[in-house]
Image (cartoon, rainbow, N blue to C red):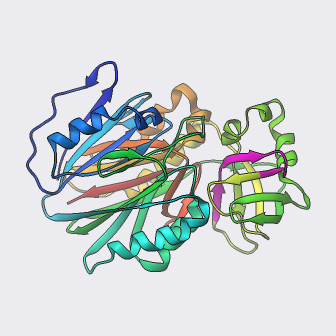
């Protein structure tokens, strides 16, 4: 595998001359600001330059390239595979109710004897991430599935996913990786619970109505205090940890929307009735340690070039502020020196918890490493 990276801004264009690449197995990853949904010029230039390429990417709440974080830009990685095969597929999604079906359809299209893994990028606002990953798990159990949900900064208004090299709304893209490619993954948070754990007494799919018999939104607001006026964006600082009685596995959920009329909270993934929910918070040191743990999970010893796709939750960036680059640096300090990193801040992360089937996560640093 050969990897090159660059950036694009409206003001300055591409940061370097586009290299000449004839490789038929060329993956071009692009992550960028949601406004590029309307500003399509750079995508058109890349599609003309690399007609043979497989394009994949989505909108973000901040773009990661190497040890740095960018805003209002595109970050781009060109990865030439030598002994692996790529197959891309897409599906439109109108709303969260279609999520499970979409996952099954995409997975079914990608099944194959030499399938090594699937990388997924989804619309970040019109999907139930839990149902989406369950659809994949139903079809490709035992295959590594990773990825994330597109972001829109703190705005929660529009997201895009690349389809045929063009930014498109209401879209889910899935990339099948076949042959000799080696895939690593890791996902950790660093958040710590506080306050009492309350039983989920009323919820439907990814909408939470009641905790311990009390309206979820009003209860949540009591913890946020003055910050409640900024919901749903300020809710990214205080996620929910979900656990089932008698189980050690814990999933984290982040708010996507609030409904004053029903006093409900909408999350990126399912909120099971009977689970126990507890608020979480974190500081810079804890979040950087979480990123380090994710890197240790995905690390491998190799002299080959490694592509690391880093997907970190927007809530982590809000907590870390101007120091957010520390988690990008922490990842590269642990992975092989030959690693090049690209990624984005998301509305949800997709990865196995440790091993086995994939889950939807929030507030994690989730890493996918690829090499041949």
Residue 356 in sight here: no
Q: Is residue 263 magenta?
A: yes
Indicate the position of residue 234 as horizontal and vertical percent values. 70, 36
Q: Residue at x 25, y 51 (%)?
A: 306
Q: Position of residue 82 (x, y in %)?
A: 12, 59
User: Which residue is at 37% across, 31% downward?
Assistant: 39
Q: Nearer the viewer, residue 283 or 150?
A: 150
- Residue name at image x 36 percent, y 65 percent: 118
Above or below, 15 relative to 111: above
- In the displayed structure image, the side of residue 63 where residue 234 appears, left or right: right
Task: Give the quadrant of residue 129.
Answer: bottom right
In the rendered structure, the answer to whether residue 64 lies left or right of residue 353 reads: left
Q: Position of residue 310 (x, y in %)?
A: 41, 47
The C terminus sits in image quarter: bottom left
Which residue appears farthest toward the top when viewing the image? 11
Residue 104 shows up from this direction: yes
Secondary structure mostly seen in the magenta stretch: strand
Query: Compared to 295, does 234 lie above or below?
Result: above
Asked whether 168 falls inside the magenta stretch, the response is: no
Q: Where's residue 23, x and y in %?
A: 10, 52
Range covered by the magenta-colored residues? 250-264
Residue 33 or residue 317, whichever sits in front? 33
């Amino acid at each position: 595998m050969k990897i090159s990276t660059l950036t694009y801004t409206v003001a300055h264009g591409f940061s370097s001359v586009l290299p000449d690449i004839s490789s038929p197995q060329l993956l071009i990853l692009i992550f960028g600001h949601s406004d590029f949904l309307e500003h399509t010029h750079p995508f058109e230039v890349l599609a003309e330059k690399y007609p043979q390429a497989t394009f994949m990417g989505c909108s973000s709440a901040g773009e990661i390239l190497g040890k740095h974080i960018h805003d209002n830009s595109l970050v781009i990685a060109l990865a030439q595979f030598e002994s692996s095969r790529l197959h891309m597929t897409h599906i439109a999604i109108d709303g969260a109710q279609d999520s499970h079906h979409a996952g099954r359809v995409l997975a079914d299209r990608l099944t194959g004897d030499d399938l090594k893994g699937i990388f997924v990028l989804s619309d970040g606002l019109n999907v139930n991430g839990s149902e989406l990953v369950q659809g994949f798990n139903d079809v490709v159990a035992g295959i590594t599935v990773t990825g994330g949900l597109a972001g829109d900064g703190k705005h929660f208004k529009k997201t895009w996913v690349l389809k045929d090299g063009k930014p498109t709304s209401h879209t889910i893209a899935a990339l099948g990786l076949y042959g000799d490619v080696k895939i690593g993954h890791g996902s950790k948070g660093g958040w710590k619970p506080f306050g009492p754990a309350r039983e989920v007494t009323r919820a439907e799919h990814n909408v939470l109505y009641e905790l311990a018999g009390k309206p979820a939104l009003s209860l949540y607001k009591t913890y946020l205090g003055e910050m409640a006026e900024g919901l749903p964006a300020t809710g990214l600082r205080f996620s929910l940890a979900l656990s089932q009685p008698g189980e050690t596995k814990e999933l984290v959920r982040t708010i996507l929307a609030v409904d004053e009329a029903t006093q409900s909270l909408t999350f990126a993934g399912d909120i099971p009735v009977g689970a126990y929910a507890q608020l979480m918070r974190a500081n810079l040191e804890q979040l950087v340690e979480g990123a380090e743990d994710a890197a240790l999970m995905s690390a491998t010893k190799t002299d080959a070039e490694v592509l690391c796709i880093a997907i970190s939750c927007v809530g982590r960036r809000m907590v870390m502020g101007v120091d957010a680059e520390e988690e990008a640096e922490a990842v590269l300090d642990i992975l092989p020196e030959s690693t090049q990193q690209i990624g984005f801040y998301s509305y949800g992360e997709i990865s196995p918890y440790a091993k086995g089937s994939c889950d939807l996560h929030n507030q994690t640093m989730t890493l996918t490493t690829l090499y041949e």
